[in-house]
Amino acid sequence: MDCTVRWMGNDAGMSFVAETGSGHVVVMDGAPEAGGRNLAPRPMEMLLAGTGGCSAFDVVMILKKGRQLVTACDVTLSAERAESDPKVFTKIHFHYRVKGQKLKPEAVSRAIELSKEKYCSASIMIAKTAEITFGFEILEEN
């Protein structure tokens, strides 16, 4: 996996463009108090979003493979960071909202557990510094 991150220069403050090995582009910016212009997500927000995306991907795939009729899935992540540098994540709570038809709570719980323990490399890596907790709710699709 490759990625190139380029500073956009003095005129852009603290904005950066990341180009991934798969050819996608993402813009990041720093906080105004650090010289950024608040034009894009912060790098740590991108890390948090990527972790949520990684886990949600797993949950949907596992539910589909288990023949669960899942129609929607979102995960809200609430994170706390250390007060001093390096300001690593110290706590992250994942709350999943899974929608579908006759979803089994034990299947959703198991999918989340498998993501946490086996498949989501991002959350497994972040768990080295952060306490990670999970919750979920199931919404019935009519």
Image: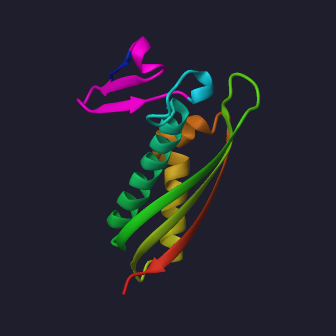
In depth, the one of 13 and 44 nearer the eye is 13
Residue 101 sits in quarter:
bottom left
Left or right: 130 in relation to 117: right
- Colour theme: rainbow
Residue nearest the observer in this picture, 137 or 120: 137
Task: Specify the segment rendered in magenta.
Answer: 9-30
Q: Residue furthest right?
A: 83
Q: Is residue 10 magenta?
A: yes
Query: For the point 36% across and 87% down, which residue is it?
Result: 142
The image position of residue 37, as x and y in percent, is 49, 29
Residue 135 is a magenta residue? no
Indicate the quadrant containing the N terminus: top left, top right, bottom left or bottom right. Answer: top left
Q: Residue furthest left?
A: 23
Which residue sits at x=56%, y=21%? 35
Image coordinates of residue 51 in percent, x first then y, are: 49, 43
The picture places residue 20, in percent across and down from the top left corner, at: 30, 27
Residue 123, compared with residue 28, is above or below; it is below
Q: Is residue 65 left or right of residue 116?
A: left
The location of residue 89, given as percent across then percent down, is 66, 36
The answer to whether residue 2 is left or right of residue 81 is left
Among the 4 quarters of the image, the one containing residue 100: bottom left
| Side of 90 where 36 appears, left or right | left
Please say if 128 is above or below 98: above
100 over 40 or under it: above or below: below
